[in-house]
Image: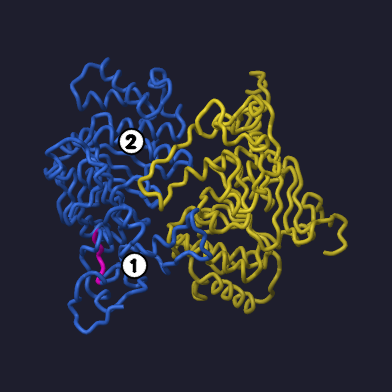
Chain colours: A blue, B yellow
Amino acid sequence: MNMTLQSTRVESSGVTTTPVLRIEDLAVEFPTRRGVLTAVDGVSLHIDPGEVLGVVGESGAGKSITGTAVIGLLEPPGRIARGRILLCGERIDGLPEDALRRIRGRRIGAVFQDPLTSLNPLYTVGQQLVETIRTHADVPPSEARRHAVQLLQEVGITAAERRIDHYPHQFSGGMRQRVVIALALCANPELVIADEPTTALDVSIQAQIITLLKRMCRDHGAAVLLITHDMGVIAETADRVAVMYAGRLVEIGPVRDVIRQPRHPYTIGLMGSIPTVRRRVSRLVQIDGAMPRLNEIPPGCAFHPRCPRVFDPCRTLRPDLTPTDHGAAACWLFGGPPPSPGEARS
Amino acid sequence: MSGQPNRAMSAPGLLIETRDLAHYFDVSRPWLARVLDGQPRTLLRAVDGISFEIRRGETLALVGESGCGKSTVARLLVGLYTPTRGMIRFDGIELAGLRARAEIAAVRRRFQMIFQDPYASLNPRWRVKEIIAEPIRAHRLVSGAGPLRARVEALLRQVGLAPADADKYPHEFSGGQRQRISIARALSSNPEFLVCDEPTSALDVSVQAQILNLMKDLQREFGLTYLFISHNLAVVHHIADRVGVMYLGRLAELGSAHEIFIRPQHPYTRMLLDAIPDLEATGERRTPVAGEVPNPLDPPTGCAFHPRCPWATDRCRSERPEPLAAPNATLTACHAVEERRLDRPEGGTP
């Protein structure tokens, strides 16, 4: 099933058959004294070249852990317990640290929530850009610097020739995030992982950064894994969206369809709970309760205790992602006849 | 408290009135360093002359980006800061005029505050029952352990928690449940007016929906009046009857939520509304707003918004606009709106 929007395809031919990123049945575990916590449980997804895949979910849903697993930055004792991660068809999970380090920056760029943690406060932004460029490409310093200035201009930093010699603290929050985007793209990576790139910014700056991230990744031909809790950001940026709940993927599909006609009861509740400026409703849709903690994920479908349409199989059997009319949802409502017979569908 | 000397004339139904409210923070360097370098005092005008009214039972939301002064207004209203200038009147009583402790306490009981961070605003060493009972004890509203316990349990039920939760500690609760505890604490002194400073910003959307629904239910049940501070326009659109849009310590536009969201006048309001990521406009391109909020220590002359405004003229650069009635019946502080030249931008593209 090809769910990519045509408009986002890059012109490069021949690579469209191999996804930039493919995650197969990924599970991430954190062994603790009181048992093993499964933060990501059986997530499978792929991103095509030039595509923006949004991953949305509430805190603790496992979306950031998925991103960290892809770039191999899981903090011990966190570990990949199961599954495979393929970058352009090559397995990258379980690679030795020095091989991973070559992939980070060169083939996978990263933009995180707080630009100050991505930038070294002791070096000018120019030094950081030049260093990254020269680590990944064999160019003389003068050319790397020229490239760095050009990148800063591309991300909208005025007087880039002068600003390149400034330190991170001399930039405002929005400008810093622009520098981080330049840094993420300076080695022309195939994939950019953006984890809550606009969450720390004010609304007006947020809009600028979303537009910039989208344009830069398109111009440089990078696919994007965009992780955020903000459905509005996903709506504006992503081609497809994956919705996560309690470490699992509950729904995936083209962004327009998932937002307008969500299928999974959790996605339906989530969409209804978001206030908008378009429509004024007297009450927001309310999903009672809260997402379970990782040590008390219920059996069957993890959402069943909060689900308004729960029926018998949900309580014991875990649903797999099943195709719906426009994407896929992990819900027994779409899972064909549930194994235990005699249950009325609600 | 009738017959108080400072109970002045107020329009009927008005609960809160502020006039030219201002609060400056002194952010000068230490005195000696400053004097040695011959520098003047540095004042940060966090709130610089704002006037608004809140009618009984309504919700006024103040919205704006970080540093616009909205939280300072909240803190001024509940008395956490003393105004540098201006007046606050609560139910006809001018707060600055109160001297006697008993008078102050009697007014204080009638308003409460809910804070943004439910992790920082509850004492981790207190049980929930102690947290909720604190305002009741402070204002001596209920006497005796039995009635106090009954009151705490009733409050917990009102905010959707279980009476047994009274004996737990805050760390045993999720963020949304903690915010419910904050609301129960705020309601415990039977207030009429609640100041809510970003009460849902730290929460996930589904939990935010629960809290917003709860706040609306409580407002209807108890006839509460809210001042709701938020940076999230969609949340404000959902909860507010009237909206004040703040920019660098001043009100850019103030009026009914309906008018502000349907026919925004001030260029800053228009810009903010354009900037919201829109769920229903997937993939559409929008024109991002240029520029960032200026340094509040060195605000632009004239209208503080002029460096980012596509309609700015020389008058905007030199003369500060005052709030005037705009075509949509809001109060809008903008020369361009006053001169009705908003649809032909000069020297820039909107």
Label at residue A265 = 1
User: Relative to residue B271, is residue A183 drawn left or right?
Assistant: left
- Which type of secondary structure does the marked residue at label 1 adopt? helix
Q: Between residues A298 and B310, which one lies in front from this camera angle? A: B310
User: Residue B163: x, y in percent?
Assistant: 52, 76
Residue farthest along the bottom direction in this orientation: A342
Q: What chain does badge 1 belong to?
A: A
Report which residue position mark 2 lands on. A215
User: Residue B192: x, y in percent?
Assistant: 68, 64
Q: Report the span colored magenta.
A: A327-332
Quadrant location of the N terminus of chain A in the rendered image = bottom left
- Look at the image and say whether residue A274 sits in the magenta stretch: no
Task: Assess disc 2: are there few (<14), some (14-19) or many (≥20) residues with their C-alpha within 10 Å of its C-alpha.
Answer: some
Based on the displayed image, in which of its 4 quarters is residue B37 positioned?
top right
User: Residue A223: x, y in percent?
Assistant: 24, 41
- Is residue A295 in sight in this rendering? yes
Q: Between residues A35 and A69, which one lies in front from this camera angle? A: A69
Q: CA distance from mark 1 to mark 2?
A: 33 Å
Q: Is residue B265 above or below residue B29?
A: below
Q: How many marks?
A: 2
Mark 1 or 2: in front is: 2
Which residue occupies 51% across, 63% down?
Answer: A281
User: Residue A129: x, y in percent?
Assistant: 31, 26
Q: Is residue A285 above or below residue B85?
A: below
Task: Give amino acid for label 1.
Answer: Pro
